[in-house]
Amino acid sequence: MRYLGFDLGASSGKMMAGSLDGHKLKTEIIHRFSNRQTMMAGGLYWDIVSIYRNLEQGIKKAHREAEVFSVGIDSFCNDFGLIDSGGRLFNQVRHYRDTRTERHAEKIYKKTPKKMLYEITGSQIALFNTSMQMAAMAYEGERFLLEGCDCALLIPDLLGYLLTGEKHTEYTLASVTQLLDYRTGTWSGELMDSLGIRKGIFPDIVETGTVTGKIRGEGLPEGDVRVVAVAGHDTASAVAALPTDKDCVGYISSGTWSIVGTEVNEPRLTEEAYRANIAYEGGVDHRYRMIKNVMGLWILQECLADYREKWGKELSYGEVDRLVADAEPWRFFLDPDDPSFYMPGNMLKKVSEYCVRTGQGEVDSLGAAIRAVMEGLAFKYRMAFELLEQIIGYRLEEIYILGGGGQNRTLNRFVAEACDRPVYAGPFEAALAGNLLVQMQSSGEISGLKEGRGIIRDSFEILEFCPEQGRLWDEQYGTWKNVTGEKEKGL
């Protein structure tokens, strides 16, 4: 059987076809496209029409080559479209970085305390959560949109609806809205009342792997092409593709965001976990992903976008590596989670201003800026793993870097050194690989997650990086904590 996965990221989208050949997954990228937010009239938006057109285009391409058995869709989480009583999309889909949540955060948290949100949902406290976006709409004069719609659909569910006409909410997506009661696995009426969100605005929750409908629509393949509710949250899909059956391991889902985490059987919503803003998110087979969010490659992507805009040149991975190698190590220390890096635009200037503000002076070259970002990420990952280990009570012996960020060999090496443990990078298309695994499990072609992860291990190149200068990096870690103020915060 031939499966097709659609993975939408914050900067690009990809579609990959795959089929099982013995114990190996044969894959082929069918379609790629860029995805970029648009700022207009004071708001930040996704071009959801273009995204859907690319989904259709990829399905047609794949089906022309060979018949597709099923399609699965994953993407970043939290953003949503609203469907009216006639089944039509009637709002522009906002971007999770839109500033409306920041404008109203104080009022929202006063009415619905952060501790209450955390204890009911296990979700991290973050401005981009679906709960915050919907609550902010009321203060923006947009409550009528929520009240007047038939339902809200998170982006993978929205795209699936546009293909099939069927409405649902996939479990892993529901788990990161900050509206799901983790204890019952159902929407929290208590939180919706407190936040002023209409109960019933989301469709019923379906289990990961559920067949939700068949493709229909003009110009799309006719026949029995199923749509499967894979792990719609791209990180959940990526973690499904961990190429190991070991338990005591950590992972970094590395892309625009870096999701640092490990798998646990049950949430531990301790006071310590709350203070550290550790999230427990739903995964495949109801494994919990215990995670800490880090700003990730967003800062690097925006720095390179600044360079491209100024000089009209796209830098290759090799050119970036050479710039970093030529820059002085540990010259600038940067906290990638500083709020100044959250919004797009002028990132090189923001990096330099951060370094001036923290008493380090101006950053005078692109290489120095990129090196500061990469070293800052490696140190931040170490701190995140220390937080996780302190709560779970044991050491995570290995680190797996999943997703496109794993192609950054310099950063992989920095992570191995800063964390002083072996790092394994791959698969680079982890979200798509996990997407296909869930489709194969849904069809009965594989027995479950354990078999699927073995297939992933045998099917993709996994790069290994071992620490060689751990002592030097350990010394610099203390300096990084002092300069960035992380030492004062403590664990």
Image (cartoon, rainbow, N blue to C red):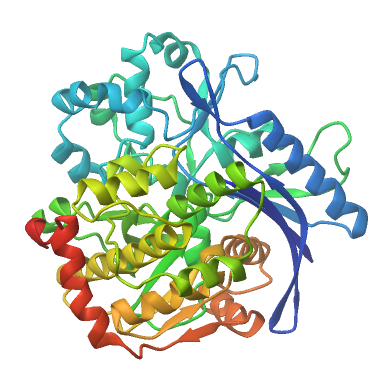
* Image position, residue 306 (x, y; %): 53, 44
The front one of 120 and 371 is: 371
Taking the image as shown, residue 79 lies to the left or right of residue 66, namely left
Q: Residue at x 68, y 37 (%)?
A: 51
Query: In the rendered image, which quarter is residue 251 located in?
Result: bottom left
Task: Judge whether 48 appears above or below 30 on screen.
Answer: above
The front one of 225 and 290 is: 290
Task: Judge whether 23 appears above or below 144 on screen.
Answer: below
Figure label count: 0
* Image position, residue 311 (x, y; %): 62, 47
Query: In the rendered image, which quarter is residue 30 located in?
Result: bottom right
Q: Residue at x 79, y 66 (%)?
A: 1
Taking the image as shown, residue 272 lies to the left or right of residue 298, namely left
* Image position, residue 491 (x, y; %): 12, 63
Query: In the rendered image, which quarter is residue 250 located in?
Result: bottom left
Q: Is residue 233 visible?
A: no
* Image position, residue 32 (x, y; %): 73, 52
Taking the image as shown, residue 424 lies to the left or right of residue 377, namely right
Q: Is residue 351 visible?
A: yes
The front one of 38 and 180 is: 38
Q: Residue at x 17, y 59 (%)?
A: 483
Q: Residue at x 21, y 38 (%)?
A: 117
